[in-house]
Amino acid sequence: MAASFGRRLAIFGGLFLLIGLPILWIMFLRELEFHGKPIPYYGPKYLNDKGDTVYHQVGSFEFTDQHGKKITEKDFDSCIYIANIFFASCPDVCPKMNSNLRIIANAFKDNPRIKFISHTVDPDSDSIPVLKSYADKHDADNLKWYFVRASKAETYSVAVDDYLLGVKDDKASNFMHSDRLVLVDRNKHIRGIFNGTAGQLENNKAIDAVKALIFEEREQSRHK
């Protein structure tokens, strides 16, 4: 019996070396990647009068969310957030994109300073009740994930000028939209643009980038 137990132990040990150690090593490398690798800034930049580099920032906006509440850029002060544009009747790209965004949101469900905002490009059809139903369908946390509406012009302006999205003309739906997820840091800088329909590998990249920004913020606070 002791010999049999020893064989089983040896088998389990071998499996751990073959499977467990590589997984732990990959996890370790990912930790090193987002802790040690700077997260880039997106968009135009310039030098101010003091010679400091000033990066592109998301400007002011005002939308209405799925509960009829006004949402502005101030609701994201000192927060990291991910933004995207969609419309509720979109048959393929948007459901996949928001399902992936839900996976990312679940990774930070216990952090109140990680938020999400989804802007509809179809305000005529996407009323507040429609947005509420859509948010419920994606199990959105009402305090962290806002599904918002404004005029098409306002939404396109935010998408193109603030989020730096190259929106596409979808002739089948007669709407312009994008499949990208935009990562914004606590200072309103764009720090990442991810493919919202690419699957778990891209989700992991977005999750790691958020973790990197959390780490960056802690480091900056520690050195003040």
Image (tube, rainbow, N blue to C red):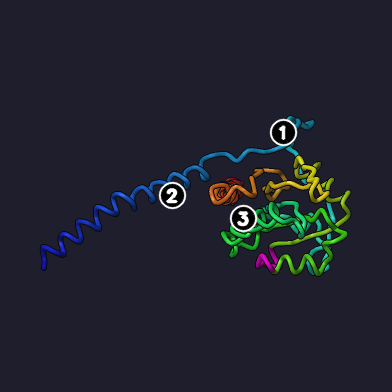
**Residue sitting at 30 percent across and 49 percent down?**
18
Relative side of 212 to 26, left or right: right
**What stretch of residues is rendered in magenta?**
137-144
As for residue 146 lying within the magenta part, the answer is: no
1 vs 2, front mark: 2
Report crowding for label 3: few under 14, some 14 to 19, many 20 or more residues within 10 A (C-alpha): many
Question: Mark 3 is on which residue type?
Answer: Asn
Which secondary structure dominates the residues rendered in magenta? Answer: loop
The correct choice, above or below, for 133 with respect to 213 in the image is below
State the separation of the CA atoms marked 3 and 1.
34 Å
The correct choice, above or below, for 117 with respect to 57 in the image is below
**Residue sitting at 67 percent across and 48 percent down?**
183
In percent of width and height, residue 34 lies at 53, 45
Find disc 1 in the rendering and name its residue.
53
Q: Which mark is residue 27?
A: 2
Question: Mark 2 is on which residue type?
Answer: Met
> Can you tell which quarter of the image residue 135 is in?
bottom right
As rendered, which of 214 and 2 lies closer to the eye?
Answer: 2
In percent of width and height, residue 58 lies at 77, 46
In percent of width and height, residue 27 lies at 43, 49
Relative side of 223 to 190, left or right: left
**Residue sitting at 33 percent across and 51 percent down?**
19
